[in-house]
């Protein structure tokens, strides 16, 4: 039996209220190894169309909810066995991972490779990309969580590379009893993820890769590495390097069937700035 895999390009920026996420997603899809897997683009609103309104605690609620439903419709039409998602902000993961959990009878495992847990709600933050895993667990924002037919099992989630958490995030993680390991803890115990896969009998796995799990000194295409930013960074930054990240994904792929991969929050500042420069040169126009 053949395995049907689709690639989704979802250049959504509204979940993080940063239009640069769109170009980062497009470049990710171009950089990925090419094969016969179809690439389908999820339409998103142009950043020049209208400003994002704060609606019931969520910035751009109407836009991101409509885009979520567009992704759901595309996935439902194709009925894939596996999905690769190129984002965009982290909220792009909701549609594919919710579908895959339903597709695999509520037993999907999920490695959340991220320096942040993304389990907040509108009570704490207005940007919806901070809520995506909360939504998938049946928490987060109620309207978005209601779009998840089968919530993920908390025991089937492993946070890899998680650094400092806010008190509300710590409370939820402890309440639901989810596994966590920082970059340093995974260096000290590299078998932790394998042991969790065996312990939970994970047969089908999705991997969320927020590139900001990487150390900004090792990878500069991150929100925290914006060369023009003058703002003080008050969020935990990633500490992982490429060899460790590669090992985590390869080892997990050997242990179980990886049916989902999402890559998000790519901000290639050099390319973004060069693109802006080229757009100002008269001969191109």
Image (cartoon, grey):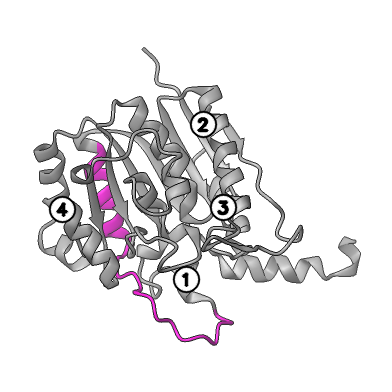
Q: Secondary structure at mark 1?
A: loop
Q: Which residue is mark 4?
A: 177
Q: Secondary structure at mark 3?
A: helix
Please tell me which residue is depicted at 45% across the width and 25% down the height of the picture. 80
Q: Earlier in the sequence, mark 2 or mark 1?
A: 2
- Give the label, 1 or 3, closer to the camera: 3
Q: Earlier in the sequence, mark 2 or mark 4?
A: 2
Q: Which residue is mark 1?
A: 220
Which residue is nearer to you in this view: 81 or 3? 81
CA distance separating discs 2 and 1: 28 Å
x and y percent of residue 235 in the render?
38, 76
CA distance separating discs 1 and 4: 34 Å
Do we see residue 27 in this rendering? no
Q: Earlier in the sequence, mark 1 or mark 4?
A: 4
x and y percent of residue 163 in the render?
26, 69
Q: Secondary structure at mark 4?
A: loop
Which residue is nearer to you in this view: 80 or 105? 105
Q: Which residue is mark 3?
A: 25
The residue segment tinted magenta is: 227-253
- Give the label, 2 or 4, closer to the camera: 4
Q: Is residue 47 above or below residue 270?
A: above
Q: Quadrant of residue 105?
A: top left
- Give the label, 4 or 3, closer to the camera: 4
Whether 240 is among the magenta residues is yes
Which residue is nearer to you in this view: 194 or 110? 110
Residue 159 lies left or right of residue 128; in this view the side is left
Q: How many marks?
A: 4
Pointer 2 with pointer 1, Cβ within 8 A: no
- Give the label, 2 or 1, closer to the camera: 1
x and y percent of residue 37 in the render?
52, 29
The label number, if any, that marks residue 35 in the structure image: 2
């Amino acid at each position: 039996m053949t395995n049907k895999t689709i690639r989704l390009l979802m250049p959504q920026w509204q979940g993080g209220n940063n239009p640069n996420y769109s170009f980062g997603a497009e470049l990710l899809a171009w950089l990925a190894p090419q094969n016969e897997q179809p690439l389908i683009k999820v339409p998103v609103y142009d950043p020049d169309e209208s400003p994002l309104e704060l609606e019931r605690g969520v910035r751009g609620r109407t836009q991101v909810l409509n885009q979520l439903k567009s992704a759901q419709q595309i996935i439902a039409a194709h009925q894939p066995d596996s999905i690769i998602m190129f984002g965009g902000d982290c909220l792009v993961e909701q549609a594919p991972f919710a579908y895959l959990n339903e597709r695999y009878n509520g037993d999907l495992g999920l490695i959340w490779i991220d320096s942040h847990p993304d389990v907040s709600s509108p009570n704490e933050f207005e940007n919806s990309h901070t809520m995506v895993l909360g939504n998938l667990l049946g928490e987060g924002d109620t309207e978005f969580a209601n779009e998840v037919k089968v919530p993920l099992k908390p025991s089937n989630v492993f946070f890899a590379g998680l650094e400092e958490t806010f008190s509300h995030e710590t409370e939820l993680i402890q309440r639901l009893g989810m596994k966590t390991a920082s970059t340093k803890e995974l260096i000290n115990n590299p078998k932790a993820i394998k042991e969790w896969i065996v312990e939970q009998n994970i047969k089908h796995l999705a991997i969320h890769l927020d590139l900001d799990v990487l150390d900004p000194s090792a990878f500069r295409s991150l929100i925290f590495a914006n060369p023009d930013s003058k703002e003080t960074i008050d969020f935990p930054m990633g500490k992982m390097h490429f060899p460790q990240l590669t090992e985590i994904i390869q080892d997990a792929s050997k242990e179980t069937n990886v049916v989902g991969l999402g890559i998000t929050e790519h901000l290639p500042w050099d390319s973004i700035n060069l693109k802006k420069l080229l757009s100002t040169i008269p001969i191109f126009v």
